[in-house]
Image (cartoon, rainbow, N blue to C red):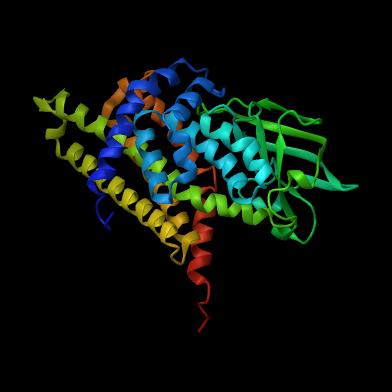
Protein backbone atom coordinates (compact mmCIF):
# COMPACT_ATOMS: atom_id res chain seq x y z
CA UNK A 1 0.00 0.00 0.00
CA UNK A 2 1.18 3.53 -0.79
CA UNK A 3 0.14 6.45 1.35
CA UNK A 4 -2.89 6.96 -0.85
CA UNK A 5 -4.13 3.69 -2.37
CA UNK A 6 -4.35 -0.04 -1.79
CA UNK A 7 -2.59 -2.46 -4.09
CA UNK A 8 -4.69 -4.34 -6.65
CA UNK A 9 -4.44 -7.59 -4.67
CA UNK A 10 -5.68 -5.88 -1.54
CA UNK A 11 -8.60 -4.30 -3.37
CA UNK A 12 -9.57 -7.68 -4.81
CA UNK A 13 -9.39 -9.35 -1.41
CA UNK A 14 -11.67 -6.66 0.04
CA UNK A 15 -14.13 -7.16 -2.82
CA UNK A 16 -14.20 -10.90 -2.15
CA UNK A 17 -14.82 -10.29 1.56
CA UNK A 18 -17.73 -7.96 0.83
CA UNK A 19 -19.22 -10.58 -1.48
CA UNK A 20 -18.74 -13.31 1.13
CA UNK A 21 -20.47 -11.13 3.72
CA UNK A 22 -23.52 -10.75 1.52
CA UNK A 23 -23.62 -14.33 0.26
CA UNK A 24 -22.90 -16.42 3.35
CA UNK A 25 -22.48 -14.36 6.50
CA UNK A 26 -25.46 -12.00 6.31
CA UNK A 27 -28.03 -14.88 6.12
CA UNK A 28 -26.45 -16.48 9.19
CA UNK A 29 -26.49 -13.17 11.05
CA UNK A 30 -30.17 -12.66 10.26
CA UNK A 31 -30.99 -16.05 11.79
CA UNK A 32 -29.23 -15.17 15.03
CA UNK A 33 -30.91 -13.87 18.16
CA UNK A 34 -30.02 -10.24 19.01
CA UNK A 35 -27.88 -10.01 22.11
CA UNK A 36 -26.74 -13.63 21.93
CA UNK A 37 -23.52 -15.22 20.69
CA UNK A 38 -24.17 -16.50 17.16
CA UNK A 39 -22.19 -19.74 17.13
CA UNK A 40 -23.14 -20.77 13.56
CA UNK A 41 -21.83 -17.40 12.36
CA UNK A 42 -18.60 -17.89 14.31
CA UNK A 43 -18.21 -21.37 12.86
CA UNK A 44 -18.60 -19.96 9.34
CA UNK A 45 -15.92 -17.35 10.05
CA UNK A 46 -13.69 -20.20 11.17
CA UNK A 47 -14.45 -22.34 8.12
CA UNK A 48 -13.63 -19.43 5.81
CA UNK A 49 -10.26 -19.01 7.51
CA UNK A 50 -11.06 -15.47 8.65
CA UNK A 51 -10.57 -16.06 12.36
CA UNK A 52 -7.13 -17.47 11.59
CA UNK A 53 -6.34 -14.23 9.76
CA UNK A 54 -6.99 -12.25 12.95
CA UNK A 55 -3.99 -13.92 14.57
CA UNK A 56 -1.65 -14.05 11.58
CA UNK A 57 -2.32 -10.66 9.98
CA UNK A 58 -0.64 -7.37 10.56
CA UNK A 59 -2.63 -4.34 11.67
CA UNK A 60 -3.32 -3.15 8.12
CA UNK A 61 -4.68 -6.50 6.97
CA UNK A 62 -6.81 -6.66 10.12
CA UNK A 63 -8.22 -3.23 9.23
CA UNK A 64 -9.05 -4.30 5.69
CA UNK A 65 -10.71 -7.44 7.02
CA UNK A 66 -12.85 -5.58 9.54
CA UNK A 67 -13.78 -2.77 7.15
CA UNK A 68 -14.86 -5.20 4.42
CA UNK A 69 -16.92 -7.37 6.74
CA UNK A 70 -18.54 -4.31 8.34
CA UNK A 71 -19.62 -3.06 4.92
CA UNK A 72 -21.68 -6.19 4.30
CA UNK A 73 -22.43 -7.68 7.72
CA UNK A 74 -21.72 -5.80 10.94
CA UNK A 75 -22.58 -8.84 13.06
CA UNK A 76 -19.89 -10.91 11.33
CA UNK A 77 -17.35 -8.12 11.80
CA UNK A 78 -18.16 -7.83 15.48
CA UNK A 79 -18.08 -11.58 16.09
CA UNK A 80 -14.65 -11.76 14.46
CA UNK A 81 -13.29 -8.74 16.36
CA UNK A 82 -14.48 -10.01 19.73
CA UNK A 83 -12.72 -13.32 19.18
CA UNK A 84 -9.53 -11.43 18.47
CA UNK A 85 -9.89 -9.06 21.39
CA UNK A 86 -10.53 -11.87 23.87
CA UNK A 87 -7.86 -14.23 22.60
CA UNK A 88 -5.04 -11.91 21.49
CA UNK A 89 -3.71 -11.65 25.09
CA UNK A 90 -3.48 -15.46 25.13
CA UNK A 91 -1.50 -15.43 21.90
CA UNK A 92 0.91 -12.75 23.11
CA UNK A 93 1.20 -13.39 26.84
CA UNK A 94 -0.18 -16.88 27.43
CA UNK A 95 1.77 -20.03 28.20
CA UNK A 96 2.26 -22.74 25.62
CA UNK A 97 -0.31 -24.86 27.46
CA UNK A 98 -2.87 -22.04 27.38
CA UNK A 99 -2.31 -21.41 23.68
CA UNK A 100 -2.62 -25.11 22.82
CA UNK A 101 -5.76 -25.46 24.95
CA UNK A 102 -7.74 -22.48 23.67
CA UNK A 103 -6.48 -20.95 20.43
CA UNK A 104 -7.33 -23.82 18.03
CA UNK A 105 -10.97 -23.61 19.13
CA UNK A 106 -10.98 -19.81 18.79
CA UNK A 107 -9.56 -20.02 15.27
CA UNK A 108 -12.17 -22.63 14.31
CA UNK A 109 -15.04 -20.58 15.74
CA UNK A 110 -15.80 -23.30 18.27
CA UNK A 111 -14.48 -21.64 21.45
CA UNK A 112 -15.83 -18.18 22.30
CA UNK A 113 -13.39 -15.68 23.82
CA UNK A 114 -14.06 -12.49 25.80
CA UNK A 115 -12.00 -9.51 27.00
CA UNK A 116 -13.06 -8.64 30.56
CA UNK A 117 -11.60 -5.25 31.48
CA UNK A 118 -14.46 -2.80 32.15
CA UNK A 119 -16.22 -2.59 35.51
CA UNK A 120 -19.22 -0.66 36.87
CA UNK A 121 -16.83 1.96 38.28
CA UNK A 122 -13.93 1.62 35.86
CA UNK A 123 -14.79 1.91 32.20
CA UNK A 124 -12.66 4.47 30.42
CA UNK A 125 -10.26 4.70 33.40
CA UNK A 126 -9.04 1.14 33.08
CA UNK A 127 -6.21 1.62 35.59
CA UNK A 128 -8.84 2.27 38.29
CA UNK A 129 -10.33 -1.22 38.14
CA UNK A 130 -11.32 -2.75 41.47
CA UNK A 131 -11.74 -6.51 40.84
CA UNK A 132 -9.64 -7.88 43.68
CA UNK A 133 -7.24 -10.80 43.37
CA UNK A 134 -6.48 -11.86 46.95
CA UNK A 135 -3.58 -14.21 47.66
CA UNK A 136 -4.75 -17.69 48.64
CA UNK A 137 -1.84 -20.05 49.20
CA UNK A 138 -0.09 -20.47 45.85
CA UNK A 139 -2.86 -18.69 43.92
CA UNK A 140 -5.50 -15.97 44.15
CA UNK A 141 -9.22 -15.56 44.68
CA UNK A 142 -11.05 -13.13 42.39
CA UNK A 143 -13.86 -11.10 43.97
CA UNK A 144 -15.86 -8.31 42.36
CA UNK A 145 -17.67 -7.47 39.15
CA UNK A 146 -17.09 -6.85 35.48
CA UNK A 147 -19.61 -5.05 33.31
CA UNK A 148 -20.25 -4.34 29.61
CA UNK A 149 -18.24 -7.41 28.64
CA UNK A 150 -18.76 -8.50 25.04
CA UNK A 151 -19.73 -12.17 24.63
CA UNK A 152 -20.58 -12.42 28.35
CA UNK A 153 -22.02 -14.48 29.85
CA UNK A 154 -21.85 -16.98 26.98
CA UNK A 155 -18.09 -17.04 26.34
CA UNK A 156 -16.08 -20.18 26.97
CA UNK A 157 -13.20 -18.29 28.58
CA UNK A 158 -12.39 -14.76 29.68
CA UNK A 159 -9.23 -12.67 29.67
CA UNK A 160 -9.72 -11.04 33.08
CA UNK A 161 -7.83 -8.09 34.52
CA UNK A 162 -7.69 -7.90 38.31
CA UNK A 163 -5.87 -5.92 40.98
CA UNK A 164 -3.11 -7.95 42.63
CA UNK A 165 -1.51 -4.93 44.30
CA UNK A 166 2.15 -5.11 43.27
CA UNK A 167 2.03 -1.33 42.93
CA UNK A 168 -0.38 1.60 42.71
CA UNK A 169 -2.70 2.15 39.76
CA UNK A 170 -1.79 0.31 36.58
CA UNK A 171 1.29 -1.25 38.20
CA UNK A 172 -0.85 -3.50 40.37
CA UNK A 173 -2.97 -5.10 37.63
CA UNK A 174 -2.59 -8.72 36.53
CA UNK A 175 -4.17 -10.59 33.61
CA UNK A 176 -5.67 -14.06 34.04
CA UNK A 177 -7.26 -16.59 31.71
CA UNK A 178 -10.46 -17.75 33.45
CA UNK A 179 -12.54 -20.59 31.95
CA UNK A 180 -16.26 -19.92 32.06
CA UNK A 181 -16.97 -23.02 34.15
CA UNK A 182 -14.64 -21.94 36.97
CA UNK A 183 -16.35 -22.21 40.37
CA UNK A 184 -17.71 -18.88 41.66
CA UNK A 185 -18.05 -17.24 38.25
CA UNK A 186 -21.52 -16.22 37.07
CA UNK A 187 -23.02 -13.64 34.73
CA UNK A 188 -26.10 -12.25 33.07
CA UNK A 189 -26.83 -10.59 29.70
CA UNK A 190 -27.45 -6.86 29.32
CA UNK A 191 -30.07 -5.45 26.97
CA UNK A 192 -28.16 -2.86 24.91
CA UNK A 193 -28.96 -0.54 22.01
CA UNK A 194 -26.81 -2.49 19.54
CA UNK A 195 -27.56 -6.18 19.00
CA UNK A 196 -24.20 -7.45 20.23
CA UNK A 197 -23.88 -10.03 23.03
CA UNK A 198 -22.88 -7.99 26.10
CA UNK A 199 -23.20 -8.91 29.75
CA UNK A 200 -21.95 -8.56 33.30
CA UNK A 201 -19.85 -11.00 35.33
CA UNK A 202 -19.75 -11.67 39.07
CA UNK A 203 -16.67 -13.17 40.72
CA UNK A 204 -17.38 -14.79 44.07
CA UNK A 205 -13.99 -15.97 45.24
CA UNK A 206 -13.11 -17.47 41.85
CA UNK A 207 -9.90 -19.50 42.28
CA UNK A 208 -7.00 -18.84 39.88
CA UNK A 209 -3.42 -20.07 39.99
CA UNK A 210 -0.10 -19.39 38.33
CA UNK A 211 -1.19 -21.64 35.47
CA UNK A 212 -3.95 -19.09 34.74
CA UNK A 213 -1.63 -16.08 34.52
CA UNK A 214 -1.29 -14.22 31.23
CA UNK A 215 2.20 -12.83 31.59
CA UNK A 216 3.65 -11.80 34.93
CA UNK A 217 1.88 -10.53 38.06
CA UNK A 218 1.61 -6.75 38.00
CA UNK A 219 2.08 -6.59 34.21
CA UNK A 220 -1.53 -7.04 33.18
CA UNK A 221 -2.11 -3.42 32.23
CA UNK A 222 0.57 -3.73 29.54
CA UNK A 223 -1.21 -6.83 28.22
CA UNK A 224 -4.43 -4.83 27.99
CA UNK A 225 -2.82 -1.79 26.34
CA UNK A 226 -0.85 -3.88 23.83
CA UNK A 227 -4.14 -5.49 22.79
CA UNK A 228 -6.00 -2.21 22.56
CA UNK A 229 -3.21 -0.49 20.60
CA UNK A 230 -3.55 -3.18 17.93
CA UNK A 231 -7.33 -3.21 17.84
CA UNK A 232 -8.02 0.55 18.12
CA UNK A 233 -7.15 1.35 14.49
CA UNK A 234 -9.27 -1.59 13.40
CA UNK A 235 -12.21 -0.25 15.44
CA UNK A 236 -11.76 2.73 13.15
CA UNK A 237 -11.84 0.35 10.19
CA UNK A 238 -15.13 -1.10 11.44
CA UNK A 239 -16.49 2.45 11.55
CA UNK A 240 -15.18 3.21 8.06
CA UNK A 241 -16.92 0.10 6.73
CA UNK A 242 -20.22 1.30 8.15
CA UNK A 243 -19.66 4.81 6.80
CA UNK A 244 -18.91 3.48 3.32
CA UNK A 245 -22.04 1.33 3.36
CA UNK A 246 -24.16 4.32 4.42
CA UNK A 247 -22.51 6.54 1.80
CA UNK A 248 -23.11 4.06 -1.03
CA UNK A 249 -26.74 3.64 0.01
CA UNK A 250 -27.12 7.42 0.03
CA UNK A 251 -25.60 7.82 -3.42
CA UNK A 252 -28.01 5.27 -4.85
CA UNK A 253 -31.00 6.77 -3.08
CA UNK A 254 -30.36 10.41 -3.91
CA UNK A 255 -29.53 9.63 -7.55
CA UNK A 256 -32.87 7.88 -8.06
CA UNK A 257 -35.33 9.52 -5.67
CA UNK A 258 -37.69 11.86 -7.51
CA UNK A 259 -38.09 15.25 -5.89
CA UNK A 260 -39.09 18.77 -6.97
CA UNK A 261 -39.16 17.98 -10.67
CA UNK A 262 -35.85 16.10 -10.72
CA UNK A 263 -33.96 13.84 -8.35
CA UNK A 264 -32.56 14.60 -4.91
CA UNK A 265 -28.97 14.75 -6.15
CA UNK A 266 -29.91 17.71 -8.37
CA UNK A 267 -30.39 19.82 -5.24
CA UNK A 268 -27.17 21.60 -4.35
CA UNK A 269 -27.79 21.23 -0.62
CA UNK A 270 -28.06 17.46 -1.02
CA UNK A 271 -25.09 17.14 -3.38
CA UNK A 272 -22.86 19.21 -1.09
CA UNK A 273 -23.85 17.18 1.97
CA UNK A 274 -23.01 13.94 0.15
CA UNK A 275 -19.68 15.47 -0.91
CA UNK A 276 -18.90 16.22 2.74
CA UNK A 277 -19.87 12.70 3.76
CA UNK A 278 -17.56 11.21 1.13
CA UNK A 279 -14.66 13.52 2.01
CA UNK A 280 -14.84 12.77 5.72
CA UNK A 281 -15.10 9.03 5.06
CA UNK A 282 -12.03 9.10 2.83
CA UNK A 283 -10.05 11.12 5.38
CA UNK A 284 -10.95 8.64 8.13
CA UNK A 285 -10.07 5.69 5.91
CA UNK A 286 -6.62 7.09 5.15
CA UNK A 287 -5.90 7.89 8.81
CA UNK A 288 -6.89 4.35 9.81
CA UNK A 289 -4.60 2.86 7.16
CA UNK A 290 -1.76 5.16 8.22
CA UNK A 291 -2.12 4.16 11.88
CA UNK A 292 -2.16 0.48 10.93
CA UNK A 293 0.88 0.91 8.71
CA UNK A 294 2.73 2.63 11.54
CA UNK A 295 1.91 -0.26 13.86
CA UNK A 296 3.15 -2.81 11.33
CA UNK A 297 6.40 -0.94 10.72
CA UNK A 298 7.06 -0.32 14.41
CA UNK A 299 7.06 3.44 13.93
CA UNK A 300 7.07 5.85 16.84
CA UNK A 301 3.87 7.32 18.22
CA UNK A 302 1.67 4.24 17.86
CA UNK A 303 -0.65 5.11 20.81
CA UNK A 304 -1.22 8.59 19.39
CA UNK A 305 -1.81 7.35 15.86
CA UNK A 306 -4.15 4.58 17.03
CA UNK A 307 -6.13 7.03 19.15
CA UNK A 308 -6.40 9.52 16.28
CA UNK A 309 -7.61 6.80 13.92
CA UNK A 310 -10.28 5.52 16.29
CA UNK A 311 -11.41 9.04 17.22
CA UNK A 312 -11.77 10.39 13.70
CA UNK A 313 -13.24 7.22 12.18
CA UNK A 314 -15.89 6.61 14.82
CA UNK A 315 -16.95 10.27 14.96
CA UNK A 316 -17.02 10.37 11.15
CA UNK A 317 -19.14 7.22 10.91
CA UNK A 318 -21.67 8.74 13.31
CA UNK A 319 -21.83 11.86 11.13
CA UNK A 320 -22.17 9.94 7.87
CA UNK A 321 -24.81 7.51 9.10
CA UNK A 322 -26.83 10.31 10.71
CA UNK A 323 -26.83 12.37 7.50
CA UNK A 324 -27.61 9.27 5.43
CA UNK A 325 -30.71 8.72 7.54
CA UNK A 326 -31.70 12.36 7.08
CA UNK A 327 -31.33 12.19 3.30
CA UNK A 328 -33.32 8.96 3.09
CA UNK A 329 -36.16 10.29 5.19
CA UNK A 330 -38.72 8.15 7.02
CA UNK A 331 -37.90 4.98 5.07
CA UNK A 332 -34.55 4.78 6.90
CA UNK A 333 -36.35 4.64 10.24
CA UNK A 334 -38.18 1.44 9.41
CA UNK A 335 -37.07 -1.58 11.38
CA UNK A 336 -34.93 -3.77 9.14
CA UNK A 337 -33.70 -0.99 6.85
CA UNK A 338 -29.92 -0.93 6.39
CA UNK A 339 -29.64 2.57 7.85
CA UNK A 340 -31.87 1.78 10.81
CA UNK A 341 -29.48 -1.08 11.54
CA UNK A 342 -26.37 1.07 11.07
CA UNK A 343 -27.84 3.84 13.21
CA UNK A 344 -28.04 1.46 16.17
CA UNK A 345 -24.63 -0.05 15.43
CA UNK A 346 -22.66 3.14 14.90
CA UNK A 347 -23.13 4.69 18.34
CA UNK A 348 -21.28 2.15 20.47
CA UNK A 349 -17.78 2.40 18.86
CA UNK A 350 -17.50 5.99 20.11
CA UNK A 351 -17.56 4.54 23.63
CA UNK A 352 -15.98 1.08 23.72
CA UNK A 353 -12.22 0.41 23.71
CA UNK A 354 -11.80 3.94 25.01
CA UNK A 355 -14.41 6.65 24.57
CA UNK A 356 -13.74 9.59 22.24
CA UNK A 357 -12.82 11.73 25.23
CA UNK A 358 -10.21 9.17 26.29
CA UNK A 359 -8.75 9.15 22.79
CA UNK A 360 -8.42 12.93 22.93
CA UNK A 361 -6.64 12.64 26.29
CA UNK A 362 -4.21 10.08 24.87
CA UNK A 363 -3.52 12.26 21.84
CA UNK A 364 -2.92 15.35 23.96
CA UNK A 365 -0.59 13.54 26.38
CA UNK A 366 1.45 12.14 23.50
CA UNK A 367 1.65 15.55 21.81
CA UNK A 368 2.87 17.27 24.97
CA UNK A 369 5.30 14.52 25.93
CA UNK A 370 8.77 16.02 25.99
CA UNK A 371 7.52 19.57 25.33
CA UNK A 372 8.90 21.96 27.93
CA UNK A 373 7.08 25.09 29.03
CA UNK A 374 8.63 28.37 27.92
Residue depicted at x 83% and y 45%: 140
In which quadrant is the N terminus drawn? bottom left
Residue 232 percent coordinates (x, y) = 48, 49
Judge whether residue 75 can be spotted in this image. Answer: no
Residue sitting at the far bottom: 374
Query: Residue 87: horizontal and vertical position, in percent?
Result: 59, 41
Residue in view at x 84 percent, y 46 percent: 139
Is 179 or 197 nearer to us in this picture?
179
Q: Nearer the viewer, residue 233 or 279?
A: 233
Up-down: is 345 above or below 28?
below
Judged left or right of residue 106, residue 4 is left
323 horizontally vs 267: left or right: right
How many numbered circles does the render carry?
0
The answer to which quarter of the image holds residue 24 is: top left
Residue 324 or residue 32, whichever sits in front? 32
Q: In this view, does 270 lie to the left or right of 71?
A: left
The percent position of residue 328, horizontal first and vertical second, equals 27, 27
Residue sitting farthest toward the left: 261
**Residue at far top of view:** 31
Residue 112 in percent (x, y) is at 59, 30
Point 77% across, 61% down: residue? 167
Q: Inspect this view and state whether residue 203 appears.
A: yes
The answer to which image quadrant residue 70 occupies is top left
Where 253 sits versus 293, above or below?
Answer: above
Amino acid sequence: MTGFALEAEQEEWCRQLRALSARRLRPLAEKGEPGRVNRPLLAALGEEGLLERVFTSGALELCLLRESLAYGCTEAETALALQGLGAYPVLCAGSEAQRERWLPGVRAGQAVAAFALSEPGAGSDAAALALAATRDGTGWRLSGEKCWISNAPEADFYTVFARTGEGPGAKGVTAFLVPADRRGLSGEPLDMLSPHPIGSLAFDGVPVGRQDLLGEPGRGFKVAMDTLNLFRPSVGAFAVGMARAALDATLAHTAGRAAFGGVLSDLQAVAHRVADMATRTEAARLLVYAAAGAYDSGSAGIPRRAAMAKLLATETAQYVVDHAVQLHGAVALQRGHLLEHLYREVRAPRIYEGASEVQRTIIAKELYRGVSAR
